[in-house]
Image: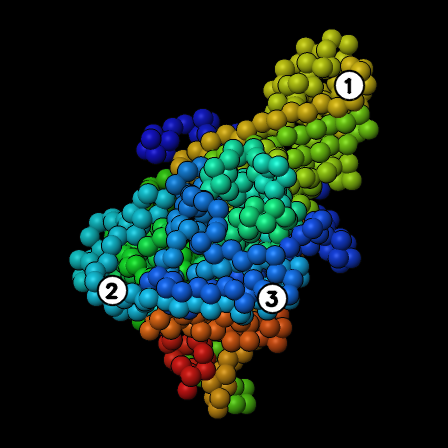
Amino acid sequence: MEKAVALAPDSWMPGGEPDPLIRAKHGSIGASVPRIDGPLKVRGAAPFAAEFALDGMLYAALMFSTVPKGRISTLDTTQAEAAPGVALVMTYRNAPRMKPMPLFMTAEKAGGSDNLPIMQDERIHWNGQPIAVVLAQTQEQADHAVSLIRATYETEAAVTSFATAKAKGTEPGLFMGQPLKAEKGDAEAALAKAPVRVDCRYSTPRHNHNAIEPHAATVAWVGDILIVHDASQAVHHTAWSLGQIFGIAEEQVHVTSPFVGGGFGGKCLWQHQVLGAAASKLAGRPVRITLSREGVYRLIGGRTLTEQRFAIGAEPEGRFVSLIHTGTVATAPQNAFPEPFILPTMSSYGSPNIKLDVQTVHLDMLANTFMRAPGESVGSFAMESAIDEMAVALGMDPVELRVLNQPEEDPLKGTSFSARHIAEAWRTGAERFGWSKRNPTAASVRDGEWLVGMGCATATYPYHRMPGGAARITLTRDGGAKVEIAAHEMGMGTATAHTQVVADRLGLSRDQVTFAYGDSAFPGVVLAGGSQQTASIGASVIAAHHVLIRDLLKLAGNDSPLAGLSADEVGTLNGGLAKLDDPTRHESYVSILTRSGRDHIAAEGSASPPLETQHWSMHSFGALFCEIGVNSVTGETRVRRFLGSYDCGRILNPKTAASQFRGGIIMGLGLALMEETQFDERNGRVMNPSLAEYHVPVHLDVPEIDVIWTDIPDPRAPMGARGIGEIGITGVGAAVANAIFNATGKRIRDLPITLDKLL
Ligand code: MOS
């Protein structure tokens, strides 16, 4: 099937005929529109999941296990039950019967992060597993009552050390049913024969999700309808999965998520929504369940650790003859997410011989999960550090080495690139940053006690579009249009950018358009993940728009200037439809509705299957430049300047896009220099479950970040736009590490690059 799609004519594919909006020169797309939800957020009028106040609502607090594996032997809740304000304590003894969460990717709308029984028995599977829920009149009363519960455990031997797990042997990593493995030619033999070689090991630690908004849900049962006000990047997945868990129809679950304070892959379905719903059922009252910051660390998985080998064989003039990227990651037995660190190597460079392989081991720990640019963010650290090591070995400029090794076509699949303007991104970036002023000799530039260096790296992230997109467009006689789609606004500007797109698509002004999202009552299975939401929404709206034009023409009838035209012959213009090659044949939406005596027309359409991703190789790229200072006395690192030069297709809104890129880069600075979940290998306990001990960049850590882009539309993507949610974090770890090498002559291959590694 994949082969057939790759070989099929372009015209059969979605994107075969480029989206007409690519050609639009004037309009809303491309305008720096401020966030339309900005004023609401500033006034505190945007309701987040933990801000819905329901009548008779109880507050939940969770107790977490303190052992990694075994059984609860005693669980004394009597004091907690007698504490002030407590309505009930739920444990495995009285929790309603529920099925496990349907594990993500096992069905179209499966959204569960693990497949364990949820408070159904006395078994413990990870250190931090919830073992009791207290419901009380106030949060403080619930938190206090939890402290009164006494638990003892009968522990069992657990695997909590990575070395122990590896000693038992590794298994091939499977990602969406496919092995994370690829081979072309004989990479080991080519490496052995290569005139110039690097062959290095890199490691990256566990990372925790730290969205500004901790996870929360406000839950109520109204009769047999379950209402969940969630913080979600997957409302339909959550609704369907909760239906499966509680044995009710998908339509009996209503999930809303109007505002989300950051998702990054962490805000799908975890046990807290399920426990909140179960406790609410038991109490017969609405429940608000809000995780503390520690609760997020105990209950919500993050990025797992990786150990990677990256080897490159090259000819003396720099051309690669072998690329090897292999290694091992840890996952939990109850999930299926091996961090796919080989992804960046699949498309970044050409080589006749390539070998990629992700092996996994199982640890008794909280299920790990997606975290911004899973695979790419840590895989690009190894890949782009190794390229820098190769540039040093060859005595070549690292920008030139990267440009020299650009592939003509997809290095593994042989398919054509939809658009690839990375060389331009490198050129414009290098010029703007002043790369030519870099001293290629390491440890040779000083500024007082600071050693100063510059480094660069490639950023990369694929274009994704997942199946299931659909949207409804409603036009009303007052000239307004509403789009409804079960998509998500997690702070990145989705509502704003798509108001702009819909305005241009329908030939309306932005104030005539309402973009409604974040509700499982709306059409479309649209995951806000994989940087695919914009493409998915775009393709869904294109489909609904086709239906709308067809229905409007029918409604316009024979008395219209449009009479006799087919849907292919008309486009949208000035609040109505017009013949494409004769805009004088035009009728406004308002006129069509008025003449036909209708007050509105609604059209729903389903997006085409995302075959473009198999027919073309579709990826975004960036060229990153970093200037760093390392204090020669203290080992302290200061990022002095950073520039990201991106090639991500059309940029829909420069203002919100710049924030996306900057946010990703800042997260990448955390990955490079400070972020690390301290996991106690003796007992599987996370030891730094707070922002006091788990460090993320603060304002003083973040320098001037400059971002630019090519803005060249991708002819195969809706609106010409590839996603920009995740590419920002990719490559940043290596850009920083390479700058540190240039500054100090020290090559640090283990993240984070803390000062102890530089002294
Ligand atoms: Mo992203 S890690 O796919 O939300």
The location of residue 134, given as percent across then percent down, is 56, 59
Q: Nearer the viewer, residue 247 or 103?
A: 247
Which mark sits nearer the N-terminus, 1 or 2? 2
Is residue 627 something that shows in the picture? no
Q: Nearer the viewer, mark 1 or mark 2?
A: 2
Confirm or deny contact between disc 1 and disc 2 (CB under 8 A): no
Is residue 123 something that shows in the picture? yes
Location of mark 3 (residue): 83
Identify the amino acid type marked 2: Lys
Q: What whole-number distance in Å separates the C-alpha atoms at marks 3 and 2?
A: 47 Å
Location of mark 2 (residue): 166
Q: Which image quadrant for residue 718?
A: top right
Identify whether 359 is placed above or below 542: below
Confirm or deny contact between disc 1 and disc 3 (CB under 8 A): no
130 left or right, relative to 560: left
Which mark sits nearer the N-terminus, 3 or 2? 3
- For residue 598, the mark is 1
Which residue is drawn at the image coordinates 62% and 70% (left, top)? Answer: 704
